[in-house]
Image (tube, rainbow, N blue to C red):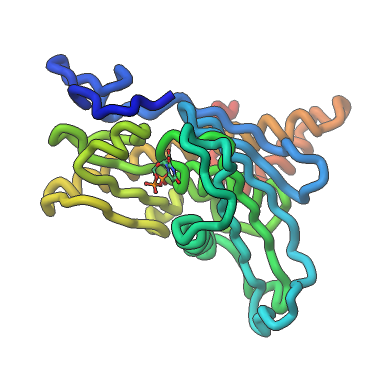
Amino acid sequence: MSPEVKPDFLISTEGLRFDGRRPDELRPIEFKVGVLQQADGSAYIKQGKTFIMAAVYGPRELHPRHLTLNDRAFLRVVYRMATFSVPDRKRPAPSRREREISMVIANALKPVLFLEDYPKAVVDVFIQVIQADGGTRCAAINAASLALADAGVPMRSLVPSVAVGKADGTLVVDLGDEEDKYGQGDVPMAIIPTTDEVTLLQQDGSFTREELVEAMQMGVQACKYIHELQKEALRRAYASRAPAEEEDDDYEDDLETDLGEADLVGEDE
Ligand code: UDP
């Protein structure tokens, strides 16, 4: 559980972080795809103690109809934190923060989706934070893009996301809750790894111009690592669904096509 009091240090004299990580070290990340049977697509992410589930339904008919967009599908993202997701009970009513994060996540995902191919429809993305320990918006984007891919929603790319922040004057990747609360700022970001386009960039706290440039470089590098983990998770899900007799060249070809741009991790040449 997070401490109630401010820790004595965020960076030790050895240059390590509150939880023993190096400044450029991510928390352990576990992805699992296809975890909910009723959803069209789903995924969870465990990133350190942060645990988030994402479910996708659609493209499907949109209700209420007055939200209909004539030229594209409506990407409806709902980010919510469970009441038990933090030590202090989170009030169940949707908060302003949850509504804002829902919008931010939708904006981070829209650039990779072909929403114009599904006028008047809706793609529903439900994100439930089971346990929050910092970096939930970024972890949610990581899980949601996997859930969209699992649902078969056409995408240009997966969208990896991470926050880079500043703790005791040192730039650190993938903030934990203590660094988020007691650090000097954070920069959540998301990218399209194939083109290096940035689809989310926020800043909380103050950074010099040089720090911001370095933070973004660290973030891009971390996002590319997360992207590899996302692709591995998709490969595992596809492989576990493939009938044994399909373990042939055609199956490998199909897998590569389905993963689109993916340079398959660890693939034999
Ligand atoms: N948090 C909390 N109660 C809340 C909202 C957030 O304890 O009602 C904690 C939670 O651990 C979250 C962290 O504060 O991960 C940082 O929240 P922030 O708004 O910066 O978003 P995040 O970093 O999770 O994207």
Residue 231 appears in the figure: no
Instruction: Report the residue at 55% width, 38% height from top.
Output: 230
Residue 233 visible in the displayed image: yes
Q: Is 185 or 217 nearer to us in this picture?
A: 185
* Between 262 and 205, the one nearer to me in the picture: 205
Left or right: 124 in relation to 14: right
Q: Quadrant of residue 231?
A: top right
Along the line of sight, which residue is nearer the eye, 41 or 133?
133
Q: Is residue 67 above or below residue 52?
A: below
Q: Residue at x 67, y 84 (%)?
A: 70
Residue at (88, 27) in percent of width and height: 245
Q: Position of residue 214 (x, y in %)?
A: 20, 44
Quadrant of the image occupied by residue 84? top right
Q: Position of residue 173 (x, y in %)?
A: 31, 35
On screen, residue 169 versus residue 187, left or right, reads left
Q: Looking at the figure, which quarter contains the C terminus? A: top right
Check the image and name the residue furthest to the top.
Answer: 14
Front position in the image: 260 or 152: 152
Quarter, ligand 1: top left
Counting from the top left corner in percent of width and height, residue 202 is at 32, 56
Q: Tally the numbered discs.
A: 0
In this rendering, is residue 60 above or below 256?
Answer: below
Name the residue rendered at 76%, 33% in the picture: 249
In this picture, is 24 found above or below 128?
A: above
Q: Is residue 123 left or right of residue 101?
A: right
Point out the image quarter for the N terminus: top left
Q: Is residue 71 above or below residue 92?
A: below
